[in-house]
Image: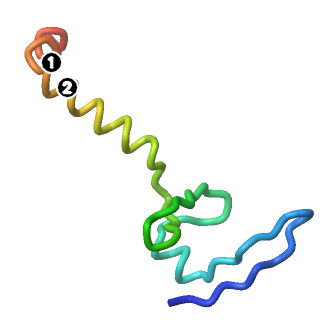
Amino acid sequence: MYKLKLTAVGNSSGVILPKDVLAKLKVEKGDVVYLTETPDGFRITPYDPAFETQMDEARRIMKKRRAALRELAK
């Protein structure tokens, strides 16, 4: 568990993530992270949840239309 302190950033507030947390998330300065609400609280992740939803739908369509996609690939 990490204790984070809120810091003033202009008219907003920000959180400084420790170096080892950034390494575990595999992000660096300038990267985008996503904060999502979960039943237990909040989750910070470098992965876009909306993109994951789109990929699940794409996988479903590719599985359903496998023969057509195979023909198009020829």
* 36, 58: nearer the viewer: 36
Mark identifier at residue 65: 1
Mark identifier at residue 62: 2
* 48, 71: nearer the viewer: 48
* Residue occupying image coordinates x 48% and y 67%: 26
Q: Amino acid at mark 1?
A: Arg
Position of residue 54 measured from the top left corner of the image (x, y, whole percent): 37, 35
Q: How is the image coloured?
A: rainbow
* Residue occupying image coordinates x 86% and y 68%: 9
Compared with residue 28, is residue 19 higher up or lower down, i.e. above or below? below
Apparent side of residue 19 relative to residue 69 in the rendered image (left or right): right
Compared with residue 5, is residue 25 higher up or lower down, i.e. above or below? above
Position of residue 73 measured from the top left corner of the image (x, y, whole percent): 18, 14
Q: Amino acid at mark 2?
A: Met
Which quadrant holds the C terminus? top left
The 10 Å Cα crowd at callout 1, few under 14, some 14 to 19, many 20 or more, is: few
Compared with residue 47, is residue 51 higher up or lower down, i.e. above or below? above
The 10 Å Cα crowd at callout 2, few under 14, some 14 to 19, many 20 or more, is: some
Residue 27 occupies which quadrant of the picture?
bottom right
Q: Residue furthest right?
A: 11
Q: How many marks?
A: 2
- The reply to whether the C-beta atoms of the residues labelled 2 and 1 are less than 8 Å apart is yes
